[in-house]
Image (cartoon, rainbow, N blue to C red):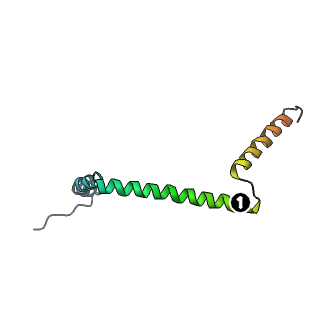
């Protein structure tokens, strides 16, 4: 008679985890895996920097403000609004 299959998800999870965990642990501790992670991380950083720099260049060419300039302007407006609401002089 074949073994009875369980429908308890925790038993299924731990049975699979018990078989896969040692293999995955060996794989993730290998030099090849660590090299692949380092390369992927470097490529991700390079890509995000490139996209950010291209976006900044496009904004500059269109004469649009940078996010830093917008944040600085928003802080100035907030300070001015606080002074006005407190009944102080805006200057």
Mark 1 lies on residue? 59
Task: Identify the residue at image location x=42%, y=58%.
Answer: 40
**Hey, which quadrant is residue 3 in on the image?**
bottom left
- How many numbered discs? 1
Specify the quadrant that holds the N terminus. Answer: bottom left
* Along the line of sight, the residue nearer the viewer: 71 or 11: 71
* Along the line of sight, the residue nearer the viewer: 4 or 90: 90
x then y, percent, for residue 30: 27, 53
x then y, percent, for residue 34: 34, 53
Is residue 29 found left or right of 58 in the rendered image? Answer: left
As displayed, is residue 9 above or below residue 79?
below
Q: Residue furthest bottom?
A: 1
As displayed, is residue 9 above or below residue 86?
below
**Judging from the image, what secondary structure is the residue with disc 1 in?**
helix
Is residue 26 found left or right of 71 in the rendered image? Answer: left
Q: Residue furthest left?
A: 1
Task: Identify the residue at image location x=41%, y=57%.
Answer: 39
Task: Identify the residue at image location x=77%, y=59%.
Answer: 63
As displayed, is residue 22 above or below residue 58?
above
x then y, percent, for residue 50: 57, 59
**Hey, which quadrant is residue 42 in on the image?**
bottom left
Is residue 64 found left or right of 6 in the rendered image? Answer: right
Is residue 44 found left or right of 51 in the rendered image? Answer: left
Specify the quadrant that holds the C terminus. Answer: top right
Mark 1, other Cα within 10 Å: few <14 / some 14–19 / many ≥20: some
């Amino acid at each position: 008679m074949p073994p009875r299959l369980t429908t308890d998800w925790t038993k299924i999870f731990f049975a699979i985890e018990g078989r896969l965990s040692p293999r995955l642990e060996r794989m993730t501790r290998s030099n090849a895996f660590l090299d692949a992670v380092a390369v992927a991380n470097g490529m991700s950083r390079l890509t995000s920097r490139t996209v950010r720099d291209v976006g900044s260049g496009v904004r500059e060419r269109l004469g649009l403000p940078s996010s830093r300039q917008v944040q600085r302007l928003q802080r100035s407006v907030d300070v001015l609004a606080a002074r006005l609401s407190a009944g102080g002089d805006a200057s």
